[in-house]
Every structure is written in structure tokens, then in C-alpha cells.
Image: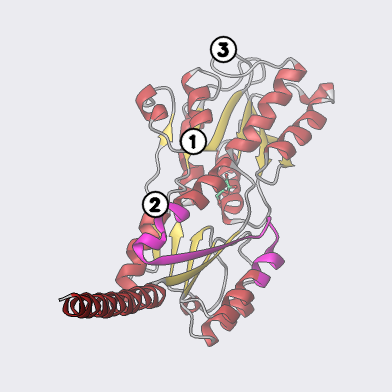
Amino acid sequence: MKRSSDTGRLIATIILMITLALAGVMMAACKGGTEETDEKELFVIGFSQLGSESDWRLANTKSMMDTFTNDKGYELVIQNAKQQQDNQFAAIRSFILEGVDLIIIAPTVEEGWENVLREIHDAGIPVIIIDRSVAVWDTNLFLTNVGSDFLRQGQMAIEWLESQPVNPDTGCLKILHLQGTYGATAQIQRTRALEEGVEAHPEWYIASQLYGDFTEAKGYEVMTEYLSDPENRDIDVIYSENDNMTFGAIQALEEAGITYGDEGQVKIITFDATKKALQLCMDGKISVCVECNPMHGPVVEDLISRYRAGESIPRQIFVDETCFTRDNLTQEIIDGREY
Ligand code: AHR
């Protein structure tokens, strides 16, 4: 009896062990298979972001990171070029060596892209340009350009300025112009809109053009220096090519004791429409916020999906943008602002 029950227990133990071993093998196979499939399925994107110079830029990077997630089948490799085009070239060449599936470039300036775009093209990797543009002869070197209509942005600001009275004491409008990174589409086109506006209005003139490189620190620095000359303090309008330079300029105005806003001496026009700038607009401190929409992620993802499905995609996409003043701004818009 004892022997037969021992044998039974032994057989049961052997069956259990075999079952467990088989289950283990199957689980390992399944797990290995899933990992392998996941790795294969990830679509690798190399993203050369030009820098982190502004709140706008941080929101733009976040939009891409929030969109191109592993969950959705993407691996996003981001390289921050710290506003140096050479760093962008180095990042792009590393993407080519890694053999990424697609490259996205947010170019710091328009010129100088022909060679590196040709290298990417020769490696058979598709390219999407976002935010600013590139000036190349062969526009087949990239699939599409997703970004802002920067000239239209500038024109919206000029349309607002046309509704403003001139300074009753001088009969003129003395405009101080804060410029972003020279050679960037955002700088070129916003500057063009202002210069064309000034040409069309004999009573407007640009007192000076200061280089703020799209950063708050530089905006503050150049404004402080400019206002240190008492002859420069009688400005009527500041046309600032982005919000961060505007914030720096506001600090300089305050330190110089110059008033601004609806009740003040200087009217401020700014570009981006970040939450902080919109709030200053609502509070009557900034007169116009021209929106520059940084939420490119979902638009770019849609284009990539269409491209991968073999569909043709438009060569240029402009994102939706608005011009805000106190007349069309609400607290709800400001509170809902993501950047
Ligand atoms: O190219 C977009 C511009 O670049 C934004 O206006 C500015 O904030 C950013 O640095």
C-alpha cells in the first residue's frame, strides 16, 4: 500500500514538474516574442530641437514628447542644439548613423541646410521641418514644413497698430524693435511685417532695432542699456518678437521708471501669447499678444501616419493662430493655456 501511494505521489510530482516547466517555457517564449515585437514596432524619430531659449520652445518640445510616446509605437530621440546650427548638424549626423526611421528638424536659422539635408536624403531617411523654415533650392529634400505663418503674425500686429492714434505731442509713433535670432524665419518675417508697415505709414518710425536673441536675459540686457541714455526714453511702442524678450523689456522699463500698458506711456506688442503674456494683456499691461502656436506634436503625428500609409501629404502646413487684445481675451482662454 505504502509503495503504491509513494509511486502515485512520484508520478503526480513528475507531472506537476513537467507542467510547470512547459508553462515556464511558454511564458518565456511569449515574453521574448512580445519584447521582440515591441522593439520591431517602435518607429524611431530623431528630433533636432534648436534650443530651450523660450517658454514657447519648452512647450514645443513637450508637445512632441507628449505625442511621440512608446505607448503609441514611437521612440523619440531628442537632441537640444542650444541655438547653434553646428550642434544641429552633429545631432543629425548621429541620427543618420543610428539609422532612425525619420528625422524632425526645428531649424535655428533658414540658411545652410542644403548639404546636411542631402546627406539625410542619400541615407534614405525622410525629414519633416517644424516651426521655422529652411531656405534650400531642392525642396524635395524634406517631406513637409509644419509651423507658423510668421509674416501673417507680423501683419496682424501691424493691423492693430494701424488702429492706434499717433502721439499727440509729436504727431508720430516712435517704435522700438526687439529682434529675435537673426536669420530665423520668426525674426525675418516679423521684422519684414514691421518694416513694410513703417514704409506704408510716414508718421511711424523705428527708433532702434535691438538684438534680443529670443531670450529674456538678452531682452532685459539690451533694453536696460538702451534706456540708460535719457534721449531714448520717449518711445511710444515696443514691437518685441517674442514674449520672453518682452518680459525682460518690461523689467527694464520698470527699473527705468517708464510706464507702459493701457494707462502708460509705452504700448507693447508681443509674439507667442504664452499664459503669462496673456495675463499681462488681460491686466492692461501688454496691448497685443500675437499667438504663435507651439503645439506641433499632433499635427506632425497625423502627417507621419499618412506618410507611412503611403498617402501624399501637403508640402506646407500652417497651424491655427489668433491675435489677442483685451477685446477678445477671456480668463477662460488664459486658464486653459498650456504654455
Ligand atoms: O520660432 C518660434 C519662435 O522661437 C517663438 O516666437 C519664440 O518664442 C521662439 O524662441
Q: Quadrant of residue 305?
A: bottom left
Task: Determine contact: label 1, label 3, CB under 8 Å.
Answer: no
- Image location (x, y in percent) of residue 76: 49, 64
Colouring = secondary structure
Q: Which residue is mark 2?
A: 319
Kind of residue indicated by mark 1: Ala
Compared to residue 183, the image places residue 199 above or below, namely: above
Label 3 Cα crowd, 10 Å radius (few <14 / some 14-19 / many 20+): few
Q: Is residue 254 magenta?
A: no
Label 1 Cα crowd, 10 Å radius (few <14 / some 14-19 / many 20+): many
Marks 2 and 1, how far apart at CA:
14 Å
Q: Residue furthest top?
A: 263
Q: Residue furthest front?
A: 1
Q: Nearer the viewer, residue 101 or 162?
A: 101
Mark with earlier residue (2, 3) = 3
For the N terminus, give its image quadrant. bottom left
Task: Determine contact: label 2, label 3, CB under 8 Å.
Answer: no
- The region drawn magenta spans 64-90
Q: Residue at x 42, y 60 (%)?
A: 68
Marks 1 and 3, how far apart at CA:
21 Å
Compared to residue 70, the image places residue 112 above or below, namely: below
Q: Which residue is mark 1?
A: 273
Q: Which residue is mark 3?
A: 263
Instruction: State the SS at label 1.
Output: loop
Mark with earlier residue (2, 1) = 1
Camera-side mark, 1 or 3 = 1
- Image location (x, y in percent) of residue 17: 29, 77
Label 2 Cα crowd, 10 Å radius (few <14 / some 14-19 / many 20+): some
